[in-house]
Amino acid sequence: MYISEGMARRLREGVLKDALSVDVLDGLKDSPYGNIPSFMDGGPLGERFLRKALTTEYDNARNALRSMGRIESVKAGDIGSAFQELLVKCQKIESANRDALEKLASNYVIDLFSVPDDTVRIEARLVGAIEDGDAISPVEPFDGDTGFEAADIEDLSGIDGQVAKRHFLNALNMGAGKRMSANIRGYIEDLYDIDSRLPQMYKELLALNDYMIFDSPDLGISDKSRNQIGIVNVRYGSRDELVTISARGVVFPVLLSELIRGFMELFSAHGLPKERDRAEYVLKKTDYLKAEPWQMRIGPYMWNIFTGYFEDTDTGDMPYIYQTLSRLKPGTFFRVFSEMMAGTGKGKEYAAKIRDKALREKERISFNGKMNKRKDDKSIITDSCMSPEEF
């Protein structure tokens, strides 16, 4: 059931490149992040920072594969065939345990973020493949009439700042999904109860996938070939309806990553402009498929730095921390993040202020929730009292 030592050696020595592809590094300037002044102006979030993020994540992916003496279920071929053969084997095992794995993914995310009952509807599905009919995001950014017209140059600059901020948050959302889903310690016992072969197989599958995302700048994504293995959609509905997070993945860790990314998208949506036409403009300019490979490459690096400031904070506090961060105006947002990503003393001060404000907000919401419950139970609070905020 295992590959030959010869194939393992080729994966470690022959197939794995010593350095990140020049094509990927050069592709940075044509990526969504290559056109953001806050990234590319030579400052803390400039080109040097992004190149370090790319090379660090590539080295991590390459070293993870090199450390494996054997990769299960691969007979011969390159990294792509290794991934496909292992994916098929995982899916075969999962097919008999689909309900248990989908439930595990949903419950894990609920526990991770301490999601209150009856606040979010979760739809988690393991599927054989992501079909073209499942497409949610366009391949390219929208380039037509968005229905938004800036009032003046200053207004145009402001909306461009919102677009840049959204790109940054999308990368963090992706990084959160990849990092949190790969930390299998939180659900490894449940996986062993379902099938003891799955934890190691998932570890190897994720290592192969992490390496492959550096294969080429756009990973062959086009209108004819979307090459997706997971998708998530956050549906907000009307004011009285529950938010629905609908995720699909071809294998459990991908499904889990997409669910986490969906929740991070929900938390970060607090940073969108309040006006509908402005919010739609930002989304049309940022939420498209060709941006996702770059989010996968740099997002985990950014997420590691970001969460390093909150290591002593419970994951149930992250929704409030992330909402607080997302609400910052673009100029403030990038000033704060420049310091945080650079690891300065000022960055630590900003992180502490964000955490303190977020925890005060969490406490306020909890208090209002308790008061509202007492109102419902005993009718002792007047109608003028503030109702609890929704997620």
Image (cartoon, rainbow, N blue to C red):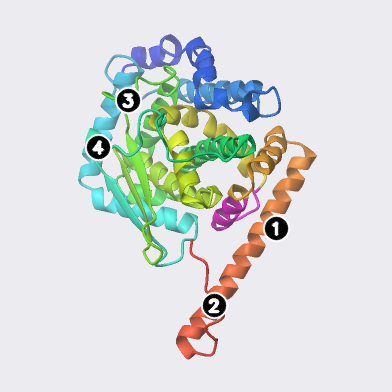
Q: Residue at label 2?
A: 370
Mark 1 neighbour density, 10 Å: few (under 14) some (14–19) many (20 or more): some
Instruction: Mark 2: give few (<14), some (14-19) or many (20+) Cα within 10 Å.
Output: some
For marks 4 and 2 on the same chain, the one whose residue lies earlier in the sequence: 4
Q: Quadrant of residue 348?
A: top right
Cα distance in 3D space between marks 3 and 1? 44 Å
Mark 4–mark 1 CB contact (< 8 Å): no
Provide residue 355's location: percent of width, then percent of height: 67, 54
The residue identified by callout 1 is 356
Circle 4: element type = helix
Q: Are marks 4 and 2 in contact (CB under 8 Å)?
A: no
Query: Residue 230, position in %: x, y?
Result: 34, 37
CA gap, disc 2 and disc 3: 49 Å
Kindly check if marks 3 and 1 are in contact, taking CB atoms under 8 A apart as contact.
Answer: no
Q: Secondary structure at mark 1?
A: helix
Tell which circle, 3 or 1, labels the residue nearer the N-terminal end: 3
User: Judging from the image, what secondary structure is the residue with disc 2 in?
Assistant: helix
Residues at marks 2 and 1 touching, judged by CB atoms closer than 8 Å: no
Instruction: State which region is magenta.
Output: 310-324
| Foreground label between 3 and 1 | 1
Amino acid type at image mark 1: Asp
Name the foreground residue: 385 vs 60.
385
Task: Name the disc covering residue 83, or none.
Answer: 3
